[in-house]
Amino acid sequence: MLRAVPKPMSPEEYLEWEAKQEVRHEYVEGYVYAMAGASNRHNRVCLNIAAFCLAHAGDGCWVYQENVKLRLENLFYYPDVMVVCGGEPPHTYYETDPCILVEVLSPSTALNDVREKVLEYRRIQSLRSYLIVDPESLFVRHFWRDEAGTWQQQDITGSGEIPLPCLGVSLSLAQIYRGIY
């Protein structure tokens, strides 16, 4: 039996609908996609990063973990960790100008995080660092915007430091994986 293709929603319809849902959904060009639950290890990595960022966030910086949306035109994502510095949030349910974004890989979203989101996130003018973190191994792919505004990439394995310029600190792999490895 064939199923009807769902009708695309406007961003406004999505926001109204999503506020009533029991599970989170990302929004891509009119269509919604349910978010799967996360493993314990995934959650601990997210919490380690968010706690580190929160400890170093100054006045005017906000740190979010998993449940606040990022809006990019006709897209709404739920980054695992998001840091926004400067100004009040533009809306009750989303942010638009992060300086740090973190996605912790999970089997259901890994391809999105390393392909689609990399391209979309690099268009954000305020973004300085994007981390893709593998919770199953000591591995972080770090994208950052250099002083000339050009995006750079570095893979960090085993140990190392990741500069987070908007917080004025560096995050180590030991801090990311604290209590896990």
Image: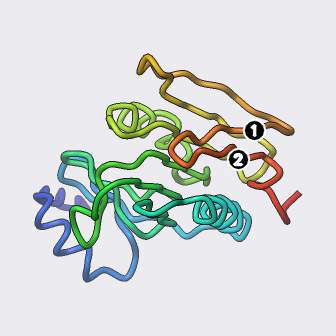
Which quadrant of the view contains residue 35? bottom left
Q: Are marks 2 and 1 in contact (CB under 8 Å)?
A: yes
* Residue depicted at 64% across the width and 35% down the height: 141
The correct choice, above or below, for 20 with respect to 113 in the image is below
Q: Callout 1, which amino acid?
A: Glu
Q: Residue furthest right?
A: 181
The correct choice, above or below, for 179 with respect to 140 in the image is below
Q: Callout 2, which amino acid?
A: Leu
SS assignment at label 1: strand
Crowding at dot 2, Cα within 10 Å, few <14 / some 14-19 / many 20+, comes out as some
Q: Is residue 99 left or right of residue 108?
A: left
- Locate the N terminus by quadrant: bottom left
Crowding at dot 1, Cα within 10 Å, few <14 / some 14-19 / many 20+, comes out as few
Which quadrant of the view contains residue 51? bottom right
Front-most of residues 100 and 35: 100
Q: Which residue is mark 2?
A: 171
Q: Which residue is mark 1?
A: 161
SS assignment at label 2: strand
Front-most of residues 80 and 128: 128
